[in-house]
Amino acid sequence: MIFALQILIAIVAVLLGILVYFYLLQSRARNKLQWMPQAPRIPLLGAVLEFGSLTETLQKFDQLIDNPQRLCYIELGLTWNILCSNYDLAEFILSSNNAAILDKSPDYTRFIEWLGTGLLTAPGKKWRGRRKIITPAFHFSILEQFVDVFEHNGKIMIEKLEKTVGKDSIDIYDYVTACALDIICETALGVSIHAQEGENSDYVFAVKELCRIPVDRSFTALKRYDSVFRFTPDYKVYKKHLKIAHSFTNNVIMKRKRELESTKGNGNLEKDSLGRKRKMAFLDLILNSTVDGKPLSNEDIREEVDTFTFEGHDTTASAITSAIFTLASYPQVQQKIREEQRQIYGNDKDRPTTYQDLQEMKYLEAVIKEVLRLYPSVPLIGRTVTADINFQGHTIPKDTVLMMYLWGHGRDPKYFEDPLDFKPERFLDNTTKPPYSYLPFSAGPRNCIGQKFAMLEMKSLLSKVFKNYEICPTDPPHQWKLSFEAVIKSRNGALIRTKKHEWN
């Protein structure tokens, strides 16, 4: 009994020692960052209780950066963070190749079980090597062949929307996300999962949950800590869906490896299940890649493919949903989009879209850019400072998490007149905007490698939607409740109405 009590006292002493150690480090950081506004806090938990639900997080962040510096020091648990919508600091961080500010923030580690240390989550040194391997996958000659994939899956979505005409409301996100997942699986994995037809529903739902749970943990006081999270209901849910997602990807990789071996690497000459010439999928390019003359391991391949699937479907689906929902309130903008489409397609709106057609959609591109300015798919990106750095005469201490608040960044009145107004024309004038004033795809060395892919996909799908339908608000107009997840989503859906548009 006495021995057990001694053990308990020792454990408590160690835990208290650890808490005191981190508290002292946090106090040091707080003192060094007194030059900026600071969020309210309580001992140990910091400002975690300030945020409430994920739906309220954006509003809270907006309040915290509503100061001349557009910066705020925030303690979350025993971590110290800078919330930033400051142009100078954003440029300083994002443009730098300094190894001390290239690593992602600790919140990204919650995706590592699923994504491994792929391009999104990799530390600086590994990231450089992977970026070099993956960059050729986004050459225009590769992107051009994916236009057929956008075309085929976009037509399925348009056919699905045909059945919604006349309904009081539909949640457009459901249609868009299924289409985006079909596209990313075909381009990344080289397989058709037919999400729009309701197939592979276990994998589709698993991906959704694996996107939601890690972000929910970041803003839930107790779930932030692995030792506590494993005793919550979400832990079992996460493990279940992790197994489903990894099993699916592993099976595809192994199957594709066997196919490539049987055709001696000429996989791009095969036919797919629809009889079309198979495109060189992202997976094929990774399978043929080497590091120091050695092929990547199955785990290396899986983490890059999973990363591409994660980053390439949820972000695009979020942007397309935001565009359609927003434009329901702007019929005049829809009309301008159709006028541009008529100039491109003439009387034959149903002919297959080409890569050149997408390049000519300048007004639609401006609309997309304006949507992303107001509703960036990824509202926040994080970096960890791995050594003390100097910024404008101030020290940003080691282990500070830099939370680059892209949502607030695009709404800075210093760089965007009437920042809350929806004005696509602001991206059509010849005015040169400061390079770090617009960051929906981040910027600098660790910017979004797939931004050209995403823009082509968004143009392709939105072009089809507005050629075929008028998008109208519900009656009364639906007010969405945007939530801070891995990407921006509406907790109560993005409800709109569809009307058939007569082209001629």
Image (cartoon, rainbow, N blue to C red):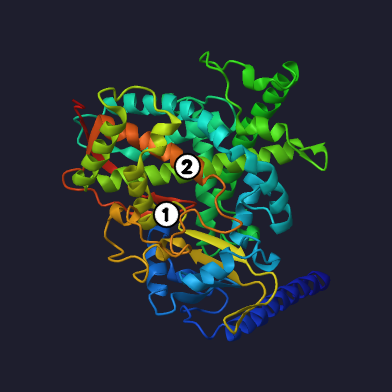
Could you tell whether 86 is left or right of 366 in the image?
right
**Residue 239 in view in this figure:** yes
Front residue (pair 498, 418):
418
Mark 1 neighbour density, 10 Å: few (under 14) some (14–19) many (20 or more): many
Q: Is residue 57 visible?
A: no
Q: Amino acid at mark 1?
A: Pro
Asked if residue 334 lies left or right of residue 311, the reply is left
Which residue is under mark 1? 376
Q: From the viewer's perspective, is residue 395 above or below residue 487?
A: below
- The residue under label 2 is which amino acid type? Ala
Q: CA distance from mark 2 to mark 1?
A: 13 Å
Drawn side of residue 424 relative to residue 74, left or right: left
Determine whether, in the image, residue 216 is placed left or right of residue 101: left
In the rendered image, residue 282, in percent from the top left (x then y), is placed at 61, 34
> Residue 303, located in which quarter of the rendered image?
top right
| Figure quadrant of the N terminus | bottom right
| Vertical placement of residue 164 versus 444, above or below | above
Q: Residue at x 49, y 36 (%)?
A: 205
Q: Position of residue 278 (x, y in %)?
A: 58, 21
Say which residue label 2 marks.
454
Looking at the image, which is closer to me, 116 or 227?
Answer: 116
